[in-house]
Amino acid sequence: MRNFFAETLYKEIKKNKNIILLSADIGNRLFDKIKKDFPKNFLNCGIAEPNMVTFAAGMAKDGFLPICYTITNFLVYKSIEQIRNDAIYNNNKIILVGTGSGLSYNHLGPTHHSLEDIGLLNNLPKIKIFSPSDNNDLKEHLRYSLNSKNLSTTYIRIGKKNEPLIKKFKSKINQINYVTKNFSDLVLIFTGPLSEPINEAHGKLKSHKVKIDIINLHQIKPITKSMIKVLAKYKYIYTLEEHFPSTGIKSILSSNLSDKKIVIKSINNKNEFVSRLGSRNYVRNKFGISGDKIFKIIINDSNKNWH
Amino acid sequence: MDNFKKLEKISNTVRYNIIKQTFLKKSGHLGGSLSCTDILVNIFNNYVFNNYQNKFILSKGHCALSLYSVLYQAKKLSKKKFYSFADQGTYFGEHSSPKIKNKYINFSTGSLGHGPSFGSGIAFSRLLKKKSGYIFVLVSDGEMNSGTIWESAMLSSKLNLNNLIVIVDYNKFQATGKSDEILNIKPLEKKWESFGWNVLECNGNNHKSLSSNIKKLIKIKEKPKILIAHTTKGKGVSFMENDNNWHYRSPSKDEFLQAKIELGIK
């Protein structure tokens, strides 16, 4: 996803010289092409994320369109006050792109995992939060964020590398994006690059004749009225996210649908740091994310006539 | 009347209006607002009101009352708005609000240590666009405690932001005591020099000293610039000077009237 981000951004800068990419000393070689062809549109701000964000707000005040890029946890946790006060409160539009989100940096441990960023930023007024499931989503989110008519600060939570493309309709801003639509009472809603466990679970559920819809929640804030209208049709919602459910999409959907009679359940239900490390799949498993777990939870509920 | 005398007179009026507000509204950071008054008066009258390309950023946002008072004195802020300070439903709070539409209020602060980062962003943008003008940022000595001040000091010097002028209102106090004792901020001038900045020191409560040093800084073509302006907290009123109780205290009627006499306001 980050390579695709660099390629897409190169094309955008080619069209619009007001875009400037700020990095907190990350992305070694990733932006070589931008640095070579558009040296004025890239700046390494050093390992000083809060300064980078306020500096970006200052550039925005003077007419630039700055993108702040670094690993999600540093970008969000170190700079939350700068994002809140200097970008959002002071109406200076910047674009925050967090890379290696969720458990992408599996081996680097909890200091590099971001399982709270959605919750922290969702709490802030006016910001828009996007969580692309693949490169096609990312392209749409970038296109929207860079559009001069959109005056909000946006946050794009991207993965790392080799995320597969998902077979789905094109994601549109402010709309629900279906991966699978069977007109079921059940829906599995995920966010981020989780197609592997989703596909695995979907195959198993299909072979057990469980009918389920699947939604890619690529836009987390705002949850629009038309999105709520679509979601309100369901009786059972399962959520899946590389994020703590207490403040992630589980919580956000629950609060948006609180006046509806919908049972909302999170597949990943842990609220602890993932300290035992391993491959991405191993760490996901430890956090409660796997195709098998999705399948078991849903099939158990089915067998209990829960649905 | 020469220019310095004029500026001194303006400073007295600005100080009087600050004190009057704190007396009427029982609100406001008085000590720090009085220490930086001359700096604000000097920069606005010499550089900002007469050149729209020069911008001012108040990093020590708790002294917004001082900024309002300077704008009010110069008739850049209406009486009605100025006297809405700390009223119910006002946008003119102890920190300025982005809801205030005034071309001299560019950034709403409140949390310390943000102004230099923001000002440097504007300054860099100006250099990229080859636009002229200087960005003035007023910080407190207490703000030297903040890590972002030094993050921004390094980036500004790497980028050679010669259009950025930071002024430290070095009144030697912060909220709960002497700034030199709370953290080891000395030697301030050497710290900034070692970060790659042009450093000058001046008497920040003296217009002649302020004017000549800012002029000198503007003439320098390389590197970002910082003016360490030595000031007195509570400046202008004998019983408020260097008494840190006035960091956040409002005067009684007798104290207000006494201050009025000392400032020569009729």
Image (cartoon, helix red, strand yellow):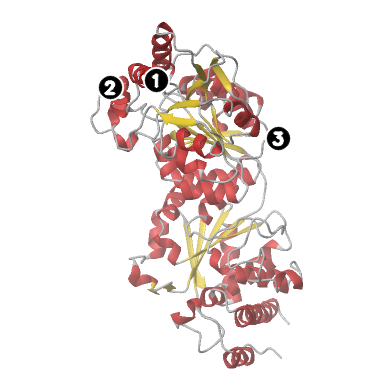
Name which of mark 2 and mark 3 comes first in the sequence: 3
Chain identifier of the residue bearing label 2 in the image: A
Chain identifier of the residue bearing label 1 in the image: A
Q: Residue furthest front?
A: A305
| Total numbered badges shown on the rendered structure | 3
Amino acid identity at mark 3 = Lys
For numbered disc 2, what is the local secondary structure? helix
| Residue A115 percent coordinates (x, y) | 38, 35
Give the CA distance from mark 2 to mark 1: 21 Å
Q: Is residue A191 visible?
A: no
Location of the C terminus of chain A (image quadrant): top left
Q: What residue would you read off at disc 1?
A: A298
| Residue B132 percent coordinates (x, y) | 67, 49
Mark 1: few/some/many CA within 10 Å (<14, 14-19, 20+):
many
Mark 2: few/some/many CA within 10 Å (<14, 14-19, 20+):
some
Amino acid identity at mark 1 = Ile
Chain identifier of the residue bearing label 3 in the image: A
| Residue B239 percent coordinates (x, y) | 50, 89
For numbered disc 3, what is the local secondary structure? loop
- Residue A224 or residue A266, whichever sits in front: A266
Q: Are marks 3 and 1 in contact (CB under 8 Å)?
A: no
Q: What residue would you read off at disc 3?
A: A149
Q: Is residue A267 visible?
A: yes
Q: What residue would you read off at disc 2?
A: A282
Q: Residue shown at 67%/35% (left/top)?
A: A150
| Residue A50 percent coordinates (x, y) | 45, 47
